[in-house]
Amino acid sequence: MSTKLFRTQWVGDVLVLTLDTPGGDFNIFSHEAAVQLLELLEGVDRERVRALVFRSAKPGSFINGVGLMMAGTAQAPEDIPRMTETVTRAYRAVREFPAPTIAAIRGNCYGCGVEFTLHCDYRVAAHTYETHFYMTEIAEYLFVPAFGSTQDLPRLLGLESATDALLWGERWSAPEALRRGLVDACFDDADFDASVSRFVRVLLECGAPKRSGRARPGRAPASPDFDANTRARIASLPTSYQPVYTECFDLMVQAARRLRTDAADYQREVEACGRAVVSPIAKAALSIFFVRRLALHHSLREHELPALTHLVIDTEDARLAALAEDLRTRRVRGLSVDVAPCTPPPDAPALHVVRYAPEQGPLPEGTVSLAVDLVTGPLQQPSDLVLYAPLLEAGLPVVELRAGQGRSVEEARTLFALLHRAGFHPVMSQAMGAPVLQTLLGAYLGPLVAHVLEGGEARDALATVRTIGFVRSPSELIRALPRAALAMALAPHLPGPVPLQRVQEALEALATAEARGAQGSAPLADAVLISLLGFASRALAERTLGHPTVVDVLARELIDFPLGFGSLCRYLTRERAARLLTSDAVRALLPREPMEALDVFIARGRDFYPQARPTSRPAAAPSVTMEQRAPASAPRSDVESDTAPRALHV
């Protein structure tokens, strides 16, 4: 017998359906959930129901959808219409239900979950950090959504806000979703249940109509140059990403011009999804979801410990004061934040957060040191619990957590769980020298700086990483960090001693260059990949990072390692490493260590991940030999012809 996924409850003439996917912290709107919902809606006494409310039994998850499972198993474009048919019928049944439908959203709402709420007439959200909205399909997995968002979001929000959400993957908090028009009300979490009841009662008393599928009155029209600006932004993406972004945007533009859409419009979206999900880059991008889950599993050892209930933050420092305010604004479930000096509640697990200082002595028990700037040497006091997050102000919430020698492992994992719950991207490290986060920055930026120091154009360096598949420009990272400190941090990643002033000048050139119309460099592309391979090899061999998935998550979140590669450690196999160029042009851009790591990795005889054997031999990817490559100085319009075989045939 199938597990019952929906709990039903009558509150007078209001029917409440509560989704509870068993065996995890997330709700998945699976095929079975769709079947059960269809049966519930077909069997209910519709004369009795004046309103239908959808809720979640999980405080951290409303609905996270079924899109990934569908995309992972599709083998041909025509598979998608068949796979989506039952879920589409369930969503359509919600839209066509005769009584007003209300999505009471508490917890994160991703992808197909957002699309589910669009089929409801009204949406209300709890004001907690975990309640946020994120369209993952394009931003994370490079395929077109399949359950109506390209049609419904533009008509509900207007084309500009819909593009921000769907095409560019903006994450919206509940208040931001209210401001944009995605939800109709935002309620305090402590009073959420009562507030939802009042909202529904007011709807019934005023005779509020059904409205799903209709354009929202008063939605802001797109500015005259919005279409051209968006297409220019798409054109700046890696070439292999542009078709899926363009097709998605075309669907949205067409929907924005209509007050209503018909079945043919939704069918075009499904067909576009089918074409996208079977592309090589979409298949590769899907793996990052599983990498993240495995990395979290590795860091938390199968269970998420309760988050700390109390943080005491030293706000005499402006950066720590900003962190305290950020944590308060996020409204993390189960966490209270105070500023020093204060006395925590006697029974509350608490940590005191202070600003990191290299010269400080050992910290008292129950204290964590937060480094918010680049450090020029090894992290001090190996017994301390240290957080390293120099890019918070740049909007990159990547946090390295170094569990010091002798510190409680449970304490470190509890802090990890807190940061994860608060929406940061924590990485557990055992770095006793330079922070691992800073080492990765150096491995990525070092070859680019060396290229400029060798006389290469800064804009060619930016074009090279874009055509490899990096979407975020390294200029953004450089602009977010102090030049002098970054120049010092890059010293170990350059091929030889260079005056600090020259390194700063190269960084300035990269920070201000524009990649449009520039030429790429094949040797530089290989140097970047060799440098990153060297980072991964050393981090795992020295046990600075405990597992390849942790390396992959850090590379994805910090330097935007290309989705089309799947992940850093999965892409850089021994076979690919052996094909990387080792010419003089490449050696000139690298110090000795990455090249040595390349040799050790190849000689070791095994990849970072076991490689599945194909059941049939795939068509060979076109290879480019040294003789076929033009010299680095030769004019070329695009380096992608040199790097695409490695990027797309993963």
Image: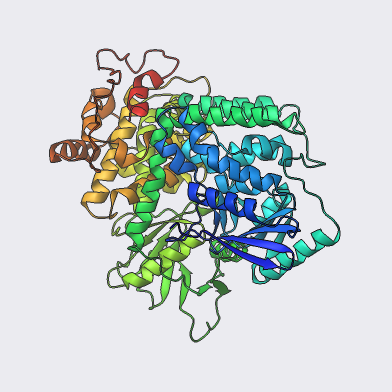
Q: Position of residue 533 (x, y in %)?
A: 28, 39
- Residue at image location 63% in from the left, 35% down from the top: 150
Question: On the rendered structure, is 178 left or right of 580?
Answer: right
What quarter of the picture does the C terminus occupy?
Answer: top left
Question: On the rendered structure, is 62 left or right of 609?
Answer: right
Q: How is the image coloured?
A: rainbow
Check the image and name the residue furthest to the right: 206
Q: Nearer the viewer, residue 509 or 550?
A: 550
Q: Nearer the viewer, residue 18 or 42?
A: 42
Q: Position of residue 430 (x, y in %)?
A: 29, 60
Where 126 falls versus 598 (above or below)? below
Q: Is residue 481 visible?
A: no
Where 166 falls versus 374 (above or below)? above
Check the image and name the residue furthest to the bottom: 346
Number of marks present in the image shown:
0
Where 20 falls versus 141 (above or below)? below
What quarter of the picture does the N terminus occupy?
Answer: bottom left
Q: Position of residue 621 (x, y in %)?
A: 30, 21
Q: Nearer the viewer, residue 376 or 521?
A: 521
- Residue at image location 42% in from the left, 53% down from the top: 374
Q: Is residue 603 visible?
A: yes
Q: Position of residue 333 (x, y in %)?
A: 55, 68
- Which quadrant holds residue 564? top left
Where 467 falls versus 366 (above or below)? above
- Which quadrant holds residue 91? top right
Question: On the rendered structure, is 428 left or right of 197?
Answer: left
Q: Nearer the viewer, residue 418 or 118?
A: 118
